[in-house]
Image (spheres, rainbow, N blue to C red):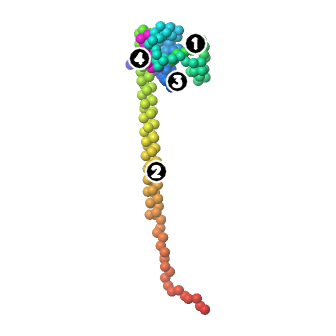
Amino acid sequence: MQTIVPAEVIERRIFLIRRQKVMLSSHLAELYAVETRVLNQAVKRNITRFPEDFMFQLTGSETEQLVSQIVIPHKKYFGGSMPYAFTEQGVAMLSSVLNSERAIQVNIAIMRAFVKLKEMLSTNKELAHNLAQLERKIEKHDGEIKLIFDAIRQLMAPPETKKKKIGFKREAES
């Protein structure tokens, strides 16, 4: 099934900010093929649909950090105002604010990217858990294997025998 925007493009635009997976308003505007100011205006006209857990505005230091990490080329990229960050729920809400066929298709692609990201994180957690369990089993088996090798070494060692000398003892001559 062909999507309007490749999943890889969307995945590269999902960032972790304030411990939340978010997409920036400028990147969303690009994907929706609208100007950032148009997206921001639509959000401001419907601000009650975007509580803090759906959308928040970045601080100056967060924006500087994005520049330093080469996520964005320069602060001017945002046109003089601090960008908005949209959580998964905020992106879902955008489709009701930007009511176009492209917005609907892009939104579907973005939702699939968020789901894929969650699945990947879940798989990694599960893999890490399984690896930890395996390490514990190996550590336990290491001790048991060491005991087995010690027992084998004891069995392989020649028995210590005290041999009595055969014959007569001569008494010391006086």
Query: Dividing the image into 4 quarters, which one contains the N terminus?
Result: top left
Q: Mark 3 Cα within 10 Å, few/some/many (few <14, many 20+)?
A: few
User: How many angstroms separate mark 3 from mark 4 (CA)?
Assistant: 25 Å
**Taking the image as drawn, is residue 12 in sight?**
no
Decide which of tag 2 and tag 3 comes sooner along the chain.
3
Q: From mark 2 to mark 3, how far is it between C-alphas?
A: 43 Å
Image x and y of residue 90, in percent: 45, 17
How far, Cα to Cα, is label 1 from label 4? 28 Å
Does the CB distance between marks 1 and 4 fall below 8 Å? Answer: no
Q: Amino acid at mark 3?
A: Arg
Q: Is residue 21 above or below residue 77?
A: below
Q: Which residue is mark 2?
A: 142
User: Image quadrant of residue 133?
Assistant: top left
Give yes or no for contact between labels 2 and 1 (Cβ–Cβ under 8 Å). Answer: no
Q: Which residue is mark 1?
A: 81
Disc marking residue 18: 3
The range drawn in magenta is 87-97
- Whichever of labels 2 and 1 marks the residue nearer the N terminus, that label is 1
